[in-house]
Image: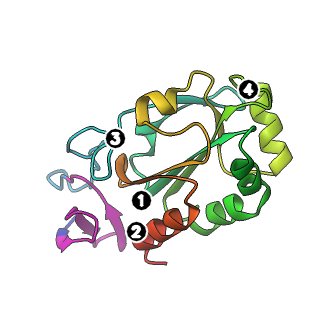
């Protein structure tokens, strides 16, 4: 297989790699064509931290069914969005009740996109559990993975606020943006990454 380096993109000089024999674009932090196969090394090389341009530390959460999800597992994704939801947050409630989360998921889900809707607090501002996670998923008709954060792990590991926090990652775990209640910024960053 031939690997052709095509130069740098607009996101800090990371290289886009094309696997010409497959006719598909791959984004990777590293590739090895010595075996004739493309391998993606994850997480991307670089400084681990909490700011844009740094590699996000790992995070482990469970979905409403109890299945574990690790942030490192998002590495093959072209982009990923983590959104934090607390039931006592009116901005979170309005966002979840709108069609925006599902519309965003539907727009990019077939383009190596991952999205986690993370429930961080229930209606009494207590730690959520799997049962409350399911309530949120069903109440708002969410179609992307819904996870719950009973121990404020997203705040501890990633510095995310417990409500209306948005973290956009590219090429695995590289932080592109971290915002609070700024869906417009999220949309702009995703459009820059995907080109649509």
Which residue is tagged 1?
Answer: 78
Which residue is tagged 4?
Answer: 130
Q: Residue at x 25, y 66 (%)?
A: 17
**Where is 97 relative to 162, above or below?**
below
* Residue positioned most to the bottom: 196
Disc 1 versus disc 3: distance between alpha carbons? 19 Å
Which residue is tagged 2?
Answer: 193
Q: Residue at x 76, y 49 (%)?
A: 93
Q: Nearer the viewer, mark 1 or mark 3?
A: 3
The N terminus: image quadrant: bottom left
Give how far across and how far down residue 118 sits, in percent: 62, 39
Which residue is tagged 3?
Answer: 50
Task: Tell me which segment is drawn in magenta.
Answer: 5-31
Q: Residue at x 29, y 50 (%)?
A: 40
Disc 2 versus disc 1: distance between alpha carbons? 8 Å
Q: Name the N-terminal-most of marks 1 and 3.
A: 3
Q: Name the N-terminal-most of marks 3 and 2.
A: 3
* Left or right for 21, reference 146: left
Decide: marks 3, 2 in contact (CB < 8 A)?
no
Quick check: is 169 in the magenta stretch? no
Badge 1 marks a residue whose secondary structure is loop
Decide: marks 2, 1 in contact (CB < 8 A)?
yes
> Closest to the observer: 33 or 128?
128
Badge 4 marks a residue whose secondary structure is helix
Q: Is residue 73 visible?
A: yes
How packed is label 1: few (under 14 Cα within 10 Å), some, or many (20 or more)? Answer: many
């Amino acid at each position: 297989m031939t690997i052709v380096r095509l130069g740098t993109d607009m996101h800090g000089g990371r290289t886009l790699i094309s696997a010409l024999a497959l006719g598909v674009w791959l984004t990777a932090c590293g590739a090895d064509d010595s075996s004739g196969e493309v391998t993606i090394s994850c997480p991307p090389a670089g400084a681990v931290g909490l700011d844009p341009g740094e590699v996000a530390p790992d995070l482990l959460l469970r979905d409403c069914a109890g299945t574990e999800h690790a942030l490192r597992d998002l590495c093959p994704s072209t982009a990923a969005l983590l959104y934090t939801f607390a039931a006592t947050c009116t901005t979170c409630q309005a966002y979840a009740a709108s069609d925006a989360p599902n519309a965003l998921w539907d727009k990019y889900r077939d383009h190596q996109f991952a999205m986690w809707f993370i429930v961080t607090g229930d209606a009494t501002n207590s730690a959520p559990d799997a049962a409350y996670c399911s309530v949120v998923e069903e109440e708002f008709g969410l179609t992307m993975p819904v996870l719950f954060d009973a121990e404020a792990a997203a705040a501890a590991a990633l510095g995310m606020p417990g409500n209306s926090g948005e973290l956009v990652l590219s090429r695995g775990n590289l932080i592109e943006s971290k915002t609070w209640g700024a869906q417009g910024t999220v949309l702009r960053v995703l459009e820059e990454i995907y080109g649509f």
